[in-house]
Image (spheres, helix red, strand yellow):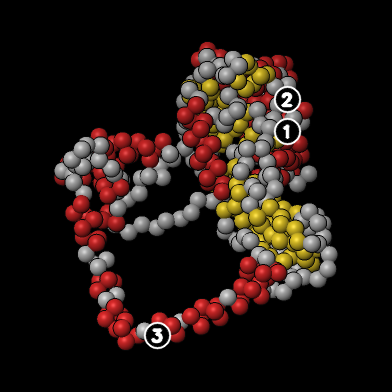
Amino acid sequence: MALEFKLPELGENIESGDVVNVLVEVGDSVSEGQSLLEIEAGKASMEIPSPVSGTIAAVHVKQGDSVEVGQLAFTIEQGGAAPAPKAPAKAEPAAAPKAESKPEPKAEAAPAPKAEAPKAEAPKAAPAPKPAAPAPAPVSVEKAVNAAPNVRRLARELGVDIHAVESSTPGGRISMEDVKNFAKAGLSSGGGALRPSSAQGAVRVEKMSSIRKATMEHMAHCWATIPHVTQHDMADITKLEQLRKRFAPRAEAVGTKLTVTAILAKVVASALKVFPKFNCSIDPAKAEIIYKQYYNIGIAVDTEKGLMVPVIRDADKKNMVDIAVDLGEIAKKAREGKIQLSDLQGGTFTITNLGGIGGSFFTPIVNAPEVAILGVGKAIMDPCIGKNELCAPRLRMPLSLSYDHRIIDGADGARFLRWIVEAIEEPMLISLEG
């Protein structure tokens, strides 16, 4: 009995993915639960198991394919021997012999036209001019564009192919508004319409990975739906850095590193308890605020495939060494492409640290459905800063807090960020209030 195995549900709101690897071939025997396919979807990689035991009769997908939930992936013969290898080509083993015999009747029909060859000699010569017809076509396409020089220049500046723009006027002349509207349509659809014309120079087209596509769609949604506000401040981490180096051996004893990011995750988890509005989501349709009673901190991780945000769960219940261990493990999984969908879900607040690369302040985009994100820049030694001493060198770290202005006001943002800064400068505050 042949089973048509279709791609199952991959996760909430995930409708498609990219085939990273096909793990079986036609004729392979598989057992129930054995992995057949490796899929990358929603920034996570996952293996798709076989629902039954049997033999692979046909493989309908290949590495690099974009596949959708419900799409036919394999034909599996349950029990018995595998069908002939020829069957997979048609995905219907029983129909394979018929498919092979069909070409013969077509071959027999061929002599009939040959018999009338004497009459058809003139038509045989006729096709020759037809191939030549396409040659002038490209020239006529260029000339068919009815647009003034300034309109063409605007199209080039916006990266719009003037030949793809449709005129809104009865005479067919392309106006500047037509070009602008075409460009706007491309931006609203993710920029897909904005392709440079060949006249601008050579290009290289590369298909987006599922991770880049997911990032594009999610970031566009977040930026379009959330009114962002970003506030900046500087934290004196001189004392914190001394403590970090002092207690680093305790983390090294369990095979991890006590990083500033791990420390910040603990600080932020404590701050969220003091300021619960930063640990919520909102439902605009119902005008409701959903306050979360758990504290899961997402950590942005830079990988070769793109940005990922794995989550450290229950950060409020873990000490800094525990968080450092978790952070090391999830970062490694993300960079090795072994991250699971569950590792990326359930975050309530995100930290993105660019200090290892450089730079100072920036404007991180809120990671919906969260309502705030903390950006961290590279710490610098400032020679003339100090609360009690003037011109005392202090190590200071730039912080950028972006938040959803629909639920968080400027005063709320200022208080939250100041609490973070004070907790960094005086860690005792975590135990006192966090």
Disc 3 residue type?
Lys
Q: Which residue lies at the image location 48% right of the left edge and 23% below the top edge?
A: 227
Q: Which residue is mark 1?
A: 313
Residue 118's image quarter?
bottom left
* Residues marked 2 and 1 touching at CB (< 8 Å): yes
152 displayed left or right of 351: left
Q: CA distance from mark 2 to mark 1?
A: 8 Å
**Local crowd at mark 2 within 10 Å, few (<14), some, or many (≥20)?**
some
Q: Which residue lies at the image location 61% right of the left edge and 56% below the top edge?
A: 19
280 displayed left or right of 253: left
Residue 237 locus on image (x, y percent):
59, 29
Q: CA distance from mark 1 to mark 3?
A: 77 Å
Q: Which residue lies at the image location 70% right of the left edge and 22% below the top edge?
A: 292
In the image, 325 versus 4, the foreground residue is 4
Q: Which mark is residue 114?
A: 3
Judged from the image, the secondary structure of the residue bearing numbered disc 1 is loop
Q: Which residue is mark 2?
A: 294
Disc 1 residue type?
Arg
**Local crowd at mark 1 within 10 Å, few (<14), some, or many (≥20)?**
many
